Image (cartoon, coloured by chain):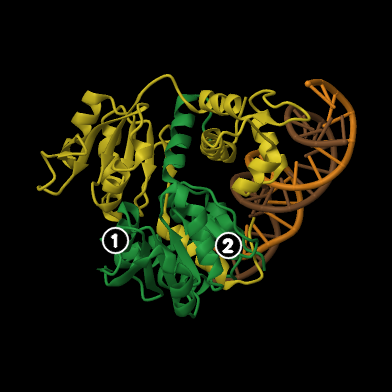
Chain colours: A yellow, B green, C orange, D brown
Amino acid sequence: MKIAEPTIERLVQYHRLLERLREEGHRVVSSQQIGELLGFKASQVRKDLSYFGEIGKRGVGYHVERLCDHIVQILSSPKIWRIAMAGIGNIGTALLSNQSFRSPKLRFEALFDIDTRKIGSEIFGVHCWDASEIPVVMAERKTEVLILAVPARAAQSCVDLAISSGVLRGVLALTQGSFVVPDEILVVRVDIPAELEKLLFFLKQPEVIPG
Amino acid sequence: MKIAEPTIERLVQYHRLLERLREEGHRVVSSQQIGELLGFKASQVRKDLSYFGEIGKRGVGYHVERLCDHIVQILSSPKIWRIAMAGIGNIGTALLSNQSFRSPKLRFEALFDIDTRKIGSEIFGVHCWDASEIPVVMAERKTEVLILAVPARAAQSCVDLAISSGVLRGVLALTQGSFVVPDEILVVRVDIPAELEKLLFFLKQPEVIPG
DNA sequence: TTTTGTGAAGTTTTTCACAGCG
DNA sequence: CGCTGTGAAAAACTTCACAAAA
């Protein structure tokens, strides 16, 4: 079945919330409560969860532990993802040190930069190569995923190198630079300055309050 | 007129692209070209731009400089935004050092943390206070915007402090923690680990390739 | 001829409203 | 009775297709 992109995004949020509720000792939770805690409508929560089978109990709600495990099933894949990161600046480093990225499901295989002080060193236990080595090292290590945290003007050339490795399948782009990829490469963009601009735009328009 | 959220997000991208094209000496650009460079359909580009008046020339395209200035008009507000940031860890520091945040339109008025080594110091030229001072300092400095980069479990209490200042209008949330706010507070969330999970979900499903 | 601007059509996503089950 | 699961309706967003302008 076809699952919508926004649903998957919310599923990650449900997962986090359920882990918290589990730790706090909650046994059951209603779609109403989930919605209030995360800022979604209860009907939205129910619709999202219903895509994956009947998991709740009518008249009662959802069993926290069961639902949590169920969502893990949906989101996780059996394989361990081999990941490369290009651009080990402030943002790259911040991510590497982030708890969420230290998961057994993710294996950082290689870092790339053009700063000679970083090249050859180990950063958070991962070796850093010169960016020109991207095709060889990514191919060797079969890293299907690239996290791109390079300056805007380096984005396209970096992606081109990664594509030429022949193993790239997805890119998480934290760079502000735009770039073109073949259709079969999946790209997810995260653009923090753009999100701030969006927030400020809607703040200056007192009448327009989106979703 | 009502402008959609996705349109504003793309407007920021158009703006960046146009600045690049301007620097590179391009005089005109078509919706087709913009679309190819940013990965949108040409009709999408035209529709977005048409919301703000007839700015292109039929048979020719858009005058790069004129369009760029026009978009700046739409996005920018006459005021300078007073911004506070809570949680001066790796991500917070990465943002403060980011070029996009060093704009004359943005004024970082205050930083907040609970680390005694940071409290009382100046970080990138901005004073850091103890998080308990959020209500007083934000009120004093009339900071309408809060960038929230604290650990998940501190998110709600931090936001509550900011709301109690009485001046908060919008939050850019980089934290993974969820929190509840009154309707009149605008929240934009950026969740990098969630975006990575989404990417991996769609990568494991070879048949489902979203938008 | 080329490319915009835009109603109308199409698609996706959210919300409603209520049947159905515990 | 309370809360889920879900078709159907509504809203939001994107794409089409073509008239109109340069």
Of the residues shown, which amino acid type is indicated by label 1? Thr
Task: Residue at 37%, 51% (x, y): give it.
Answer: A178
Query: In terms of depth relative to the viewer, which is nearer, B90 or A176?
Result: B90
> Around disc 1, counting alpha carbons within 10 Å, would you say few (fewer than 14), some (14 to 19), or many (20 or more)?
few
Q: How many marks?
A: 2
Residue annotated with mark 2: B186
Query: In terms of depth relative to the viewer, which is nearer, A176 or A10?
Result: A10
Residue annotated with mark 1: B116
Which badge, 2 or 1, is on the more N-terminal residue? Answer: 1
Callout 1: SS: loop
Q: Say if labels 2 and 1 share a chain.
A: yes
Would residue B46 be seen by someone viewing this image from the given angle? no
Would residue A133 be seen by someone viewing this image from the given angle? yes
Q: Position of residue B46 (x, y in %)?
A: 56, 59
The N terminus of chain A sits in image quarter: top right
* 2 and 1 marks in contact (CB < 8 Å): no
Query: In terms of depth relative to the viewer, which is nearer, A28 or B211?
Result: A28
Q: Is residue A119 above or below residue B141?
A: above
Mark 2–mark 1 Cα distance, whole angstroms, equals 30 Å
Decide if residue B33 is on the left or right side of residue A142.
right
Task: Residue at 34%, 51% (x, y): give it.
Answer: A175
Q: Is residue B127 above or below residue A34?
A: below
Of the residues shown, which amino acid type is indicated by label 2? Leu
